Image (cartoon, coloured by chain):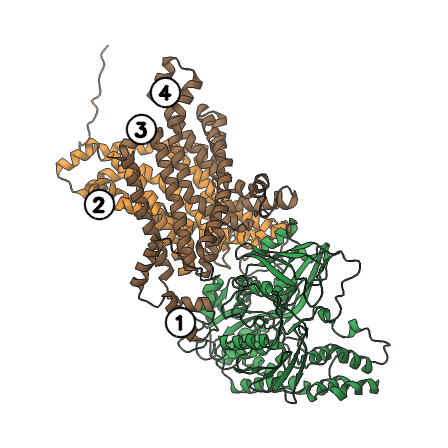
């Protein structure tokens, strides 16, 4: 252990950061977990590298790129010297529903807006889906308890129209988001909580301590793109093209596609490619066909079932990121046939999770244990036993609950593999004598009628169907899942789950200051959710995207934001 | 030479037209049977009907709950291979006939019954009734069937009941128009005048005199509608607004698996598609034969 | 002739009104919070109410209906609920794209089908005739999405002869555009070949058996002259009728083909709008399709009337 080096970092760290360093030094965190925690709490890349070097004195000089997540944009634009400049990339993407940065809800929209706008904290070029790296913010520092965060902004950044990017733009963006009720910031950042200390610093005063706050203003909270002060709520990117990012919007046709050209004044340096051409699709199948037919070079996202051929294509640069993408099988806990915990557990015991993973994702997914803490999160606690299929136990639980011949309607929306999941669940449940009748509808109808009905008698999400499957995209931290889907009266709480024990555990997780406290809170959350089973969660599946091997340097988040600022023709 | 002429027995004078009609029908039938197209068409349709009725009893595997390895190519164990979830395609194609052969005929029958009634009324009574109804019918004829069906199904939800109603209602105008023109030519004939002179009421004339004579075009129309119904229901399922998973419906199966053809997995798409094509072709062969025979 | 046209126009207007009403009824039959749909599930209720008031969707249904009809009549279709952009320009562009596809399909099928029909009729009941009839029945029984899929895989991916995405690059010249549209157009053309060929055959047979044809032949005209002066005109009447009717079915087939080839025509647009419950887009789209159909039928009727004066007189009875 190289103590002098370690002390150097310790001396300049605030208590929250210190705690992470100590945990790593004492061996309570793996290197990967340390890197993730450290970037969240705002330790600089240099410090992280130093700590790792200090604590692994057996290995000689740490390779900065190996130990710490590559800094991507903040270091000098490091495209390989042999890369050709120039060229255009044709990208197949889902058709955006909306490109209003504040109100957009779909992956298509996220991907398009992320080309022109940027986040305070952005995605890790190395592809780690629970890490964030500096974007428009260079550094972020929590105070002792994590209730106030100070973000130091990057300097000399210009908007596409030439005006200067300042802290006022950040403050205005945050206010707009808070007014609109952004799901990640709700209850965390109060109105007026963001204040510009000077032109290059923003201070966030939160409603309470929150150790994960930087995630909530990162690429993983897709609406938190920083937009100009003058951007009124409801403005869309095509109506008022703007941004600080590497690409300027040239054309946009909501039906067919969009084109971007290089922003020559981007702070990250000139991009190797001249421009981007997005082509919009309604489904992944035609995207794959288009790639095979040489009409697109990249796919933002595809699923295993449509793109099986791409997984083994030698000319395809596959991006396969383990991510927290999942499906929740919600069960009403307040009334109906699943109100009894034993019945919910019985259903969960019929899931044959490995079979689901194999049949639906060719093995490219991780098992879920009926809670939303993905094993890729740094504070995941693996001590809760993994639930496996146990038909005998399921039958026993049903008998204990006094239920025989359970028959229920399983609602699902038409999205990717969800109808297939429903079919497989139906046949698995049948083994325990549970009859599930499937009701698959188009996604739009499903959301408005079964999941969180449009006119809830008892807002925010009452009136949901008794049993259904809903999709969740990736998040860098589980805060959104816990807050929205599981907390009492959460806005997406379709199971009407109301458990004080859970709410308490969630609060202690949010306010946890220190790795050990976070892990302990998570363990509690996992145990409570696994036991109460308001939702069945069989898997977390991988995010797939990629480009043809003719291009290299592309990286992506698991929310559909693909970054091309380093992409070049090989 | 003495020629003894056996007197021809003279039957009852009542309804000579009816026995003539019956004889004509028997003749038609005999002619039809001789046409290979008619036979082939009927054999195929009957084959599918039997398959639909027997369903799971004759499938080699369970089409819903038995899962093997995904996308196995056709082999002696799985004549048509397996689909993406590992279900036997042959079993699913066999059971998939059931939904189509229930929904399509029901829709066709609804359209034909409603259309025939409408056509009879319009063609016989003429006058204002005909004028108003004709305008409405023509207006409906202008509507693109698939668009209205699509809209209705998206809004009301895609239950088989709604599909039958929507497709049936949208077929009514065409049938009505055909029946109406047939009635128009019939009503001028003598037997109708005779009936009116006898004092028969309108409905009586319609049902007893006119309707049996327009039966020919009606039957042809019904068969043609049946073919269109299968076609339309398959297209709606393909677009995602017809039957829903996990139904093994043919149109739905094609839409679920056609993306995989790129990867070389042709069997889960091709066989349901051939099933659709074979059924529609068979029905059209029958319709075509009926049309040529009955119009001579 | 003028009376004929004016009568048809009046009819068309009634149909369009009916179409607009049907779309309105369908779109409003279920409770539909438009403001909520546009702003999303997380917007505060006050914004939703304000938007509803601005759009006028909180008024009683009869008032909304009258207003909707008025706007249809004045071509004021407003903005899409989904994208917030004006509906008409988007639909106009989509219509042009679909028209190109449909046009190419008809161009491919009509000459071939008519020729086949005539050929078959002249050789009635011989093997060639039976063959063509069988081909016609078969080809019109295979749904467009079946032929489309097979074409994509065989011609597009395996043989790489034609591009698999039907949308040509912007500002492409005509031959390039045709190249891109060839596969989807063929998928549609195959289906219509059957109908048109059989109709032509039936019409030609009837005419060939008629008195005036026999008279013409007996008068000493050559077969060629007979065909040109008498037969073609009258035989094609039912064909023209069929082609007009097919415009309605054309739209149905186009939706499936556009889905497979990812072509942004009316079919895709309407499918998407239906799924998103984008009512302004649906209403405007339905009207446009209705108008196109009206024009097609009117043109067909006028062509038929020009070809056979008896029809003109009949219609005026």
Q: Secondary structure at mark 3?
A: helix
Q: Secondary structure at mark 4?
A: helix
In the rendering, at what x and y percent does residue A472 appear? Answer: 56, 70
Query: Dot 1 corresponds to which residue?
Result: C50
- Whole-angstrom CA distance, mark 4 to mark 3, is 17 Å
Q: Secondary structure at mark 1?
A: helix
- Whole-angstrom CA distance, mark 1 to mark 3, is 60 Å
Q: In which chain is the residue bearing label 2?
A: B
Q: In which chain is the residue bearing label 1?
A: C
Q: Quadrant of the C terminus of chain A?
A: bottom right
Query: Dot 3 corresponds to which residue?
Result: C309
Picture disc at residue C213:
4
User: Quick one: label 4, few (<14), some, or many (20+) residues within 10 Å?
Assistant: some
Question: Looking at the image, can residue B223 be seen?
Answer: no
Spot the brown chain and give its letter: C
> In the rendered image of this protein, does residue B43 appear above or below residue A495?
above
Q: In which chain is the residue bearing label 3?
A: C
Mark in front: 4 vs 3: 3
Residue drawn at the location 29% of the way across and 32% of the way down: C312
Residue drawn at the location 32% of the way across and 51% of the way down: C17
Spot the green chain and give its letter: A
Mark in front: 2 vs 3: 3
Please report whichever mark, 4 or 1, sits nearer to the chain's N-terminal start.
Answer: 1
Residue at mark 4 shares a chain with residue at mark 2: no
Mark in front: 1 vs 3: 1
User: Quick one: label 2, few (<14), some, or many (20+) residues within 10 Å?
Assistant: few
Query: Dot 2 corresponds to which residue?
Result: B129
Picture disc at residue B260:
none
Residue at mark 2 shares a chain with residue at mark 3: no
User: Quick one: label 1, few (<14), some, or many (20+) residues within 10 Å?
Assistant: few
């Amino acid at each position: 252990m190289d103590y002098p080096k370690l002390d150097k970092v310790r001396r300049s760290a605030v208590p929250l950061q210190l705690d992470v360093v100590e945990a790593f030094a004492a061996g309570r965190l793996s290197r990967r977990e340390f890197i993730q925690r450290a970037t969240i709490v705002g330790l600089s890349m240099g410090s992280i590298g130093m700590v790792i070097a200090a604590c692994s004195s057996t290995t000689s000089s740490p390779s900065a790129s190996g130990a710490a997540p590559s800094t991507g944009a903040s270091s000098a634009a490091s495209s390989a010297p042999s890369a050709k400049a120039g060229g255009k990339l044709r990208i197949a993407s889902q058709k955006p529903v909306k490109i209003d940065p504040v109100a957009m809800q779909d992956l298509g929209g996220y991907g398009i807006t992320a080309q022109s706008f940027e986040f305070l904290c952005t995605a890790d070029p190395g592809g780690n889906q629970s890490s964030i790296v500096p974007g428009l913010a260079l550094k972020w520092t929590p105070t002792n308890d994590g209730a106030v965060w100070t973000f130091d902004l990057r300097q000399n950044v210009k908007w596409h129209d030439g005006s200067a990017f300042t802290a006022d733009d950040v403050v205005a963006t945050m206010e707009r988001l808070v007014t609109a009720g952004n799901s990640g910031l709700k209850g965390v950042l109060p109105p007026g909580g963001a204040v510009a200390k000077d032109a290059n610093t923003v201070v966030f005063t939160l409603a309470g301590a929150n150790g994960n706050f930087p995630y909530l203003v990162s690429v993983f909270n897709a609406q938190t793109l920083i937009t100009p002060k003058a951007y009124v709520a409801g403005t869309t990117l095509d109506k008022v093209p703007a941004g600080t990012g590497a690409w300027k919007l040239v054309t946009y046709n909501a039906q067919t596609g969009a084109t971007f050209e290089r922003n020559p004044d981007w702070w990250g340096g000139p991009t190797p490619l001249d421009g981007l051409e997005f082509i919009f699709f309604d489904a992944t199948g035609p995207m794959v066909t288009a790639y095979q037919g040489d009409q697109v070079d990249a796919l933002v996202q595809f699923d295993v079932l449509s793109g099986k051929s791409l997984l083994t294509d030698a000319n395809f640069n596959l991006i396969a990121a383990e991510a927290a993408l999942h499906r929740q099988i919600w069960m009403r806990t307040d009334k109906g046939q699943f109100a009894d915990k034993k019945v919910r557990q019985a259903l969960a015991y019929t899931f044959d999770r490995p079979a689901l993973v194999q049949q639906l994702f060719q093995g490219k997914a991780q098992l879920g244990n009926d809670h939303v803490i993905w094993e890729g999160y740094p504070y995941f606690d693996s001590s809760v036993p993994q639930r496996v299929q146990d038909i005998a136990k399921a039958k026993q639980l049903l008998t204990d609950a006094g239920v025989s011949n359970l028959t229920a309607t399983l609602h699902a929306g038409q999205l990717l593999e969800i109808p297939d999941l429903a079919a497989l669940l139906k046949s698995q449940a049948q083994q325990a004598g549970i009859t599930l009748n499937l009701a698959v509808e188009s996604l739009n109808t499903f959301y408005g009628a079964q999941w969180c009905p449009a006119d809830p008698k008892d807002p925010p999400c009452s009136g949901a169907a008794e049993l259904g499957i809903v999709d969740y995209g990736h998040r860098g931290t589980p805060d959104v899942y816990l807050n929205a889907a599981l907390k009492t009266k959460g806005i997406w709480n379709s199971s009407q789950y109301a458990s004080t024990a859970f709410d308490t555990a969630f609060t202690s997780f949010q306010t946890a200051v220190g790795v050990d406290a976070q892990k302990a809170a998570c363990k509690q959350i996992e145990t409570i959710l696994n036991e109460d089973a308001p939702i069945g969660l069989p898997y977390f599946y991988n995010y797939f995207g990629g480009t043809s091997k003719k291009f290299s340097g592309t990286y992506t988040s698991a929310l559909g934001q693909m970054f091309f600022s380093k992409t070049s023709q090989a | 030479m003495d020629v003894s002429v056996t007197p021809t027995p003279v039957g009852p004078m009542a309804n000579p037209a009816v026995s003539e009609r019956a004889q004509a029908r028997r003749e038609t039938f005999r002619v039809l049977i001789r046409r290979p197209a008619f036979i082939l068409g009927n054999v195929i349709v009957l084959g599918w009907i039997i398959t639909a009725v027997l369903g799971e009893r004759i499938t080699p595997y369970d089409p819903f709950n038995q899962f093997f390895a995904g996308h196995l190519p056709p082999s002696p164990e799985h004549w048509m291979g397996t689909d993406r979830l590992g279900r036997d395609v042959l079993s699913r194609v066999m059971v998939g006939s059931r939904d189509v052969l229930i929904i399509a005929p029901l829709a066709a029958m609804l359209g034909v019954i409603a259309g025939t009634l409408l056509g009879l009324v319009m063609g016989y009574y003429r006058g204002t009734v005909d004028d108003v109804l004709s305008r409405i019918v023509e207006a409906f004829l202008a509507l693109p069937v698939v668009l209205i069906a699509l809209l209705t199904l998206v809004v009301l939800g895609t239950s088989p009941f709604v599909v039958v109603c929507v497709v049936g209602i949208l077929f009514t105008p065409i049938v009505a128009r055909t029946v109406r023109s047939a009635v128009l030519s019939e009503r001028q004939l003598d037997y109708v005048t005779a009936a009116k002179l006898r004092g028969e009421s309108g409905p009586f004339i319609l049902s007893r005199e006119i309707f049996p004579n327009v039966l020919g075009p009606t039957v042809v129309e019904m068969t043609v509608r049946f073919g269109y119904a299968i076609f339309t229901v398959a297209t709606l399922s393909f677009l995602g607004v017809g039957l829903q998973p996990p139904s093994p419906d043919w149109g739905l199966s094609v839409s679920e698996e056609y993306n995989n053809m790129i990867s070389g997995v042709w069997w889960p798409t091709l066989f349901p598609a051939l099933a659709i094509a074979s059924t529609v072709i068979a029905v059209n062969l029958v319709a075509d034969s009926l049309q040529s025979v009955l119009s001579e | 002739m003028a009376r004929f046209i004016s009568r048809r126009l009046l009819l068309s207007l009634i149909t369009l009104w009916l179409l607009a009403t049907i779309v309105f009824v369908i779109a409003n039959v279920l409770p539909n919070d438009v403001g909520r749909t546009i702003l999303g599930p997380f917007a505060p209720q006050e914004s939703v109410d304000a938007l509803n008031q601005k759009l006028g969707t909180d008024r009683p249904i009869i008032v909304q209906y009258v207003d909707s009809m008025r706007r249809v009549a004045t071509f004021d279709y407003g903005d899409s609920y989904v994208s917030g952009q004006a509906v008409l320009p988007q639909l106009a562009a989509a219509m042009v794209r679909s028209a190109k596809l449909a046009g190419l399909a008809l161009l491919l099928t009509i000459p071939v089908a008519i020729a086949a029909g005539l050929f078959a009729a002249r050789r009635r009941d011989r093997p060639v005739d039976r063959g063509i009839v069988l081909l016609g029945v078969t080809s019109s029984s295979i749904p467009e999405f079946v032929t489309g899929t097979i074409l994509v895989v065989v011609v597009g991916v395996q043989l790489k002869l034609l591009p698999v995405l039907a949308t040509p690059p912007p500002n492409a010249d005509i031959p390039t555009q045709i190249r891109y549209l060839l596969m989807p157009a063929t998928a549609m053309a195959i289906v219509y070949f059957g109908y048109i060929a059989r109709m032509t055959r039936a019409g030609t047979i009837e005419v060939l058996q008629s008195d005036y044809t026999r008279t013409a032949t007996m008068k000493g005209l050559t077969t060629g002259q007979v065909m040109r002066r008498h037969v073609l005109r009258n035989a094609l009447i039912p064909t023209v009728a069929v082609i007009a009717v097919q415009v309605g079915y054309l739209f149905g087939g186009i939706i499936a083909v556009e889905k497979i080839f990812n072509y942004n025509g009316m079919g895709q647009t309407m499918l998407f709008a239906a799924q998103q419950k984008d009512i302004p887009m649906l209403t405007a789209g339905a009207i446009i399709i209705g108008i196109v159909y009206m024009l097609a039928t009117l043109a067909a009727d006028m062509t038929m009337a020009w070809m056979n004066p008896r029809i003109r007189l009949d219609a005026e009875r």
